[in-house]
Amino acid sequence: MEDETPKMLETILGPAALAGIPEGGPWRASLASVRPEEGLEEIVLSLETGDGAPHAPPRVALALHAPVRGAVACWTPQHVHFEMPLPWTQARVGANAARDLPLYANVGPDGAARLVLAVSECVRRVAIRGVVDEFRADEELEVAFFTEPEDALSRYSVRIRLDTRLRPFATALAEAADWTDGFASAQLAASAARHSSLVTRHSAEPPEAARRPWYSTWYSYHQNVTADAVVAEARASRRLGMRGLLLDAGWMKSRPEVPGGWMAEARFGDWTPDPRKFPDMRAVSRAVRAEGLAFGLWFALPFVSRHAAAWRKWHDRTLWIRRGGSAEWGILDPRFPEVRAHLASLVGRATREWELDALKLDFIDSFELRASAPANAPGALIAPNLPQEAAERSNPRAFEPEIPAEGRDFVSVPRAVVALMEEVSAAIRAANPDALVEFRQGYVGPAIRPFGSMMRASDCPSCIATNRIKTVDLRLTSGATPVHGDMLEWDLGASAEDAALQLLATLFAVPQVSVRLAELPPRHRAMLRFWLRFWNAHRATLLGAPFRPLHPEAAYPVVAAAGAKETVTAVYQSGAVADALQDGAATGYVANATAAEGLVVRFPSPPRSLELYDCTGRRVPCASRLPRSAAILDLPVPPSGLLVAHR
């Protein structure tokens, strides 16, 4: 059946064409435009059936051509794009409730946004594609809807927001993210009627424990973690200024004799502690809390392993299954109500019986049909949340089983994920109303974020620049939800200055430390104590003051948080100029987050005094003469050190 003639609309970018409505089918489409101010437009796409009855919606796509207007880089959620997308490097976003954000942006060489595109759909999948059209010297954009199986509808409306106002990138992107948040709240209204705390909790003051440094066992121990190690790290973490401990993967029963790595060994689905390492999980929880830390536990919610007792009951209610060697595991299908009830019961019981303060609910973005996942999704080259193309390359034996549809109460997987998280969150809070939930960067969209208490940058071990970019991006799009950096590990044989760069990369997010604290060299320990003490003392500014990441096209070489009384700035690129004493603040702190000796600092008015500290907090001499007027100074701030300026 051929498509009808595309619907056309003149937009602020030029003509837009809607295609995909089958000729003679039940669906009718219309396009309209709302322009609240110059340079800002909302395209309203409406669909309805001619007979008023529900039908499966068709795949529809809106195509636009946008003038490049001097853009030098594009931005997509979590993929760290800093180049314009070429035909062979197309930028793609595959957003739904459990993956990504429906946002796309271009930025110019001045750090100003040239275009920010946002979509009001926050649950069902939205596929956004951007590519420079070499034949027209502009950018081709496409926004597609209903690209995967969806529940029958009789009408549908969605808005595509175009912002071409030349404003600072951080301002424009954060405003677009807030706009999508508003629509997500409306889409979750039915859920809020059943569990009213789920939507309102996100806008409330974040829990205190979510805004303090944490210790994570993942990079420091991986699978080789024990109860004694956890308690010892809790004691050491408290002394260094941390207030939470997350016991990551490695605590559950496994089969060490099974080849294929830790994914093959773990008995996912049962979620019972390994008695050899954790004979009494409640005792571990109480011991950690006795040290003054919140205690959290890792769960890969979607997984069920063939080696688990749960496999016999649940393997025939999976979205897809992967085989590798003698290992086999599946991704549970949340469209079955009994699957949702099982998972909610599981985490609720664990929270209650083990007295958990927090849960890390991981791999939520694996809840999707492999055929629908974007090829460049995070984790595309590793198991288990593989999109189809990567899965076929790395393991052709990953497959979607033939399972009858009977028993499912959703066709849409993303809508079922939202229903799952409603039930899971209700079960957790029934067991502990103050329990925290950590999500990873793969699933930070506005429809899923209300179920989380903290958002962590996705895995980038030892990657300083990537951790900085990810945490800054999350700060711009996560509203009031506290953002955590990926866990920090470093080479214990390196200098303390090099090690400090890992911590400084996430200065404007909540740090999570993941090194064996007892093995830290003395200068590393002094460095960690100094910078964690600084972070705790200034966290109100670091997390709550107006956030100013500069020059996204250059990967944020300077980032600042400017409050009324103090400003904190970090310089991540040698030679970049930092502004001290911003907005009339009495004190300015400037971190030298580089390996270079010295910082170039601009003073709008003469400082009263200057102090310099090395990476361990030791004060070092400052021979520079104080200026008598506004000035730019080259100051000998040590690598990974700190400048303090007083007005």
Image: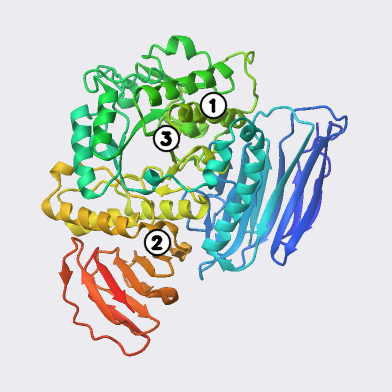
Q: Quadrant of residue 214?
A: top left
Which of the two discs, 3 and 1, labels the residue nearer the N terminus?
1
Which of the two discs, 2 and 1, labels the residue nearer the N terminus?
1
Query: Helix or strand or loop: what does disc 1 sit on?
Result: helix
Q: Which quadrant holds the C terminus?
A: bottom left
Q: Mark 3 = which residue? A: 435
Mark 2 burial class by Cα count in 10 Å: few <14, some 14-19, many 20+: many
Check residue 423 in the rendering and tell me which mark sits there, or answer none: 1
Q: Residue at x 52, y 31 (%)?
A: 388
- Answer with left or right where residue 236 lies relative to residue 178: left
Q: Is residue 229 in view?
A: yes
Viewer-proximal residue among 599 and 358: 358
Q: Mark 2 = which residue? A: 541
Q: Do the residues under discs 3 and 1 have CB atoms within 8 angstroms?
A: no
Query: Helix or strand or loop: what does disc 3 sit on?
Result: loop
Q: Is residue 600 above or below residue 160?
A: below
Position in image of residue 512 (x %, y %): 31, 46
Q: Is residue 334 above or below residue 584?
A: above
Q: CA distance from mark 3 to mark 1?
A: 15 Å
Q: Residue at x 79, y 39 (%)?
A: 47
Q: CA distance from mark 3 to mark 2?
A: 25 Å
- Camera-nearest label, 3 or 1: 3
Query: Helix or strand or loop: what does disc 2 sit on?
Result: helix
